């Protein structure tokens, strides 16, 4: 199953705006925002200096506008969150993880379109 197929189960296609909040997470907020989350978490690992990350951010922002708060969306700056990067063995960016109860369920590495 493709990564965004999992998201499509939670994404609404009607005209209403469901905009989920995008939360910026770092090593200090990791436990409360990701591990203890009752919702599945889409974690987007990025860096300010990464051109592909800037492009991927637009896709993440668009998805956030269609998720009816059945999923938590977080952005993690790899330069500011070294412990999280080590925990999930992030070696390339952009990387998107689907996480539930702190455990990685699915991983996508590299620039991806909304259809992927």
Image (tube, rainbow, N blue to C red):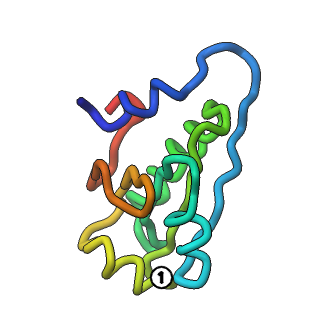
Displayed quadrant of residue 14: top right
Image quarter in which the C terminus is found:
top left
Q: Is residue 23 above or below residue 85?
A: above
**Residue in the image at 47% along x and 82% along y:** 81
Q: Is residue 62 left or right of residue 46?
A: right
Residue 100 at x, y percent in the picture: 43, 53
Q: Is residue 19 above or below residue 45?
A: above
Label 1: few (<14), some (14–19) or many (≥20) C-alpha neighbours in 10 Å: some
Residue 56 at x, y percent in the picture: 45, 50
**Residue in the image at 59% along x and 45% along y:** 61
Q: Is residue 16 above or below residue 63?
A: above
Image quarter in which the N terminus is found:
top left
**Residue in the image at 31% along x and 50% along y:** 105
Residue 19 at x, y percent in the picture: 71, 38
Foreground: 65 or 89?
89
Total numbered badges shown on the rendered structure: 1
Which residue is identified by label 1? 81
Residue 22 at x, y percent in the picture: 65, 54
Foreground: 106 or 96?
106
Q: Is residue 37 above or below residue 5?
A: below
**Residue in the image at 50% along x and 74% along y:** 77
Disc 1 element? loop
């Amino acid at each position: 199953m493709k990564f965004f197929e999992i998201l499509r189960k939670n994404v609404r296609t009607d005209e209403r705006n469901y905009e989920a909040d995008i939360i910026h997470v770092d090593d200090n907020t990791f436990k409360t925002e990701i591990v203890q989350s009752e919702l599945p978490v889409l974690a987007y690992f990025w860096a300010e200096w990464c051109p592909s990350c800037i492009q991927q951010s637009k896709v993440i922002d668009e998805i956030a506008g269609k998720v009816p708060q059945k999923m938590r969306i977080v952005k993690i700056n790899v330069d500011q969150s070294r412990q999280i990067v080590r925990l999930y063995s992030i070696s390339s960016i952009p990387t998107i993880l689907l996480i539930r109860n702190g455990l990685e369920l699915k991983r996508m590495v590299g620039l991806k379109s909304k259809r992927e």
